[in-house]
Image: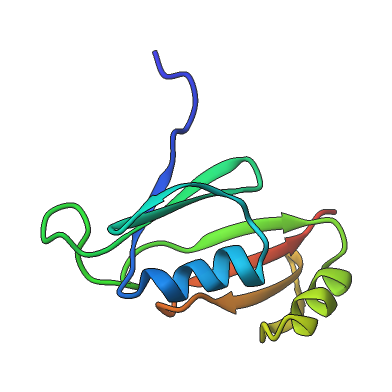
Amino acid sequence: MFEEAAFMAFTTADLAQVKRFWVTLLGFPIVREDENYLMVHACGFRLCFDLPDGENHRAPGSDGVIGLQVKDLDAVLAALGNRGVVAMGPYHDHHGKWAKLLDPDGRSVILTERR
């Protein structure tokens, strides 16, 4: 019945800041954008960031946690640090090695190292 995930949508207060974080700092390509939303291709799925519309997109930052898997967490954190991205971690727990970033709306972006 269902073929594939089309996108995951999140609400943002500031598209320019979201674009700077996801495209400029993290390096994900833009799929499409207009004055009300930005969609990026992130590790095999599409993330869509929309301005509030009072219907589907409500309070910025109140929705979702984004998880991205990386091959070498230390190398990724070093590269992101060179771009000015501040990460919390790395941490080690029963899930493995991980770190946390915050996007411009305070949404958690969890980076996990592939085991």
**Quadrant showing the C terminus:** bottom right
Q: Left of 16 or right of it: where is 20?
A: right
Residue 59 image point, x, y percent: 23, 71
Q: Left of 70 or right of it: where is 45?
A: left
Which quarter of the picture shows residue 62?
bottom left
**Quadrant showing the N terminus:** top left
Residue 28 image point, x, y percent: 63, 56
Which quarter of the picture shows residue 50?
bottom left
Comparing 49 with 16, the one in front is 16
Q: Left of 39 or right of it: where is 60?
A: left
> How many numbered markers are drawn?
0
Furthest residue toward front = 35
Q: Coloring scheme of the render?
A: rainbow
Q: Left of 46 or right of it: where is 114?
A: right
Residue 65 image point, x, y percent: 48, 63
Residue drawn at the location 62% of the way across and 69% of the way down: 24
Comparing 86 with 114, the one in front is 86
Furthest residue toward left = 54
Which quarter of the picture shows residue 11?
bottom left
* 37 versus 63 height, above or below: above
Residue drawn at the location 61% of the way across and 51% of the way down: 29
Furthest residue toward top = 1
Residue 110 image point, x, y percent: 61, 67
Residue drawn at the location 59% of the way across and 63% of the way down: 23
Residue drawn at the location 66% of the way across and 86% of the way down: 86
